[in-house]
Amino acid sequence: MFTTQNIKGDIFGGLTAAIVALPLALAFGISSGAGAVAGLYGAIFTGFFAAIFGGTSTQITGPTGPMTVVMALVVTHFSGNLALAFSTVILAGGFQILFGLAGIGRFIKLVPHPVVSGFMSGIGGIIIILQIAPLLGHSAPNGDILTKLTALPEILGEANTHALGLSAITLLIMFATPKRLAVLLPPPLIAAFVGTLAGVFYFSTAPTIGEIPAGFPTLTIPDVALADIPFIIKFAIILAFLGAIDSLLTSLVADSMTRTHHDSNRELIGQGIGNVVAGLFGGIAGAGATMRTLTNIRAGGTTRLAGILHAVILLLLVLGFSGAASQIPLAVLGGILIKVGVDIIDWNYIKRMHRAPLAGVVIMLTTLLITIFVDLIVAVAVGIIMASLLFVSRMADAQLKSAQLTSNSNGVPNLSPEEAEILDRAEGKIVLFHMEGPLSFGSAHDITKLLLTTGEKEVLVIDLSNVPFIDGSASFALDETIRSLHEQDDLVIVFGARPNVVETLHSTGTLDRLDFHRVLDNRFEALTKAVTLLSEHEPQDCELKT
């Protein structure tokens, strides 16, 4: 875990990450509505325990923009009852632990990119909207996003000029700090230091954080009323899912920087433990933080020691310097979060939107708008459903294009001379159906229609040798096809089905309609059997089993 070679880099990485995390933790705590100290506690406890138990050795965990947006919704819903808000954090951590134990980590990474892009861009937009009021020297209005937007004209008319001055200074520092200087001194730290000094000496009427409780936090066991449980579960699921996505995306970024491979499920367990402990000690929820993780890596952090030190340093700052932090103006924190919101927006996708597939753009914009104006979990659900339907539709089109239905030797690949002679001699009475790829519910209806509307025939030979998988819906559709062909006095032979395909066809009763001698291994056997069936004259030999 630790070696003498990496201790120096881990110390610098942890120290630098803590310096970056301090103003962000304060800002996220204020923005969540739980208070600055809740942001600090969230950074300390999630950062410490996720570093120990997580699956990404260089990851720095703490409050993030997306998690803070949800926390703000939680605090608002429970009318400022922080006990219920922290109960939600605890349950969210429990869900994340269950995600990891159940091996769900690999599935969370399968969320389509347009959905993630729209969701994260929507989160970035929400953060920016929420910080407009603090930039102008006011508290963010209560209510949904539309309510906050409609209140902006009145807030603009009553702007605090000192807060505006600090906002301008902070935004200038956050967006215009040269990259070379930013490597040595993180812009959030510069903004917090310069903004606080300016607030003390020149812009004294701008609102500040106010008193921050000093000392180590106390353990609190939540007391939850039965009526609040459904809402706690709802928000906990959102936090758990969002934190999982946020953390695993950051893990992928860390992998690309360090040429390592994280353990997704262990990472979820570590994040869950961190959030459970944070909730117990009055901290807001956290997740893997991309900017702080990259800062740690660039400063030389290579092991879990860096994440642990980052949390310990933050704790020491809380114990010894909370008085100084209380003087930081809210407009400064708002300016820092404006930059965070801008960075969360997926500008890379937006810049390529005019060249991106139209369907993906529609999914992205739909997810974005629902995220901002409706609900976060609804946005993800709608986006995934749209992307899934699009995928199924495209798969169905590809499956249908691969389907070949022929009654002669032309166009059938790899036919032996004997097989070609059988097809040609049958003069259309034997029809061979061949397709490649999985056979799923998306294409089942069209393939059934194709098989039932194919001219005059007496024997349909179905080639499943290149079908690696068939789902239940497609199996039932094939069963319906066999039944309908039987009613038309046509026969069906199946060959080449793989064991898992045979198992599905058997479980749905599809193979029960066929005699055992009409489920064969290869094409020559199937075509030979078709000739035999055609030559038989006794009806009882040609009937399908019902």
Image: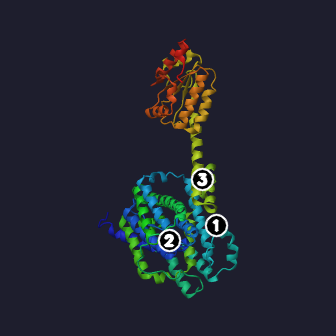
Judge by depth and name the residue closer to the eye, 66 or 342: 66
Q: Secondary structure at mark 2?
A: helix
Q: How is the image coloured?
A: rainbow
The residue at which mark 3 appears reads as 382
The residue at which mark 1 appears reads as 145
* Residue 58 position by quadrant: bottom left
- At x 38%, y 69%, the residue is 308
Is residue 302 visible in this depiction of the protein? no
The C terminus - image quarter:
top right
Among the two numbered marks 2 and 3 on one chain, the one whose residue lies closer to the N terminus = 2
The residue at which mark 2 appears reads as 83
Q: Secondary structure at mark 3?
A: helix
Judge by depth and name the residue closer to the eye, 398 or 457: 457
Q: Does residue 417 lie above or below 332 as drawn?
A: above
Q: Mark 2: give few (<14), some (14-19) or many (20+) Cα within 10 Å.
A: some
Q: Determine the CA span between mark 2 and mark 3.
A: 31 Å
The x and y percentages for residue 190 are 50, 77
Q: Does residue 125 lie above or below 462 as drawn?
A: below
The x and y percentages for residue 291 are 48, 66
Among the two numbered marks 2 and 1 on one chain, the one whose residue lies closer to the N terminus = 2
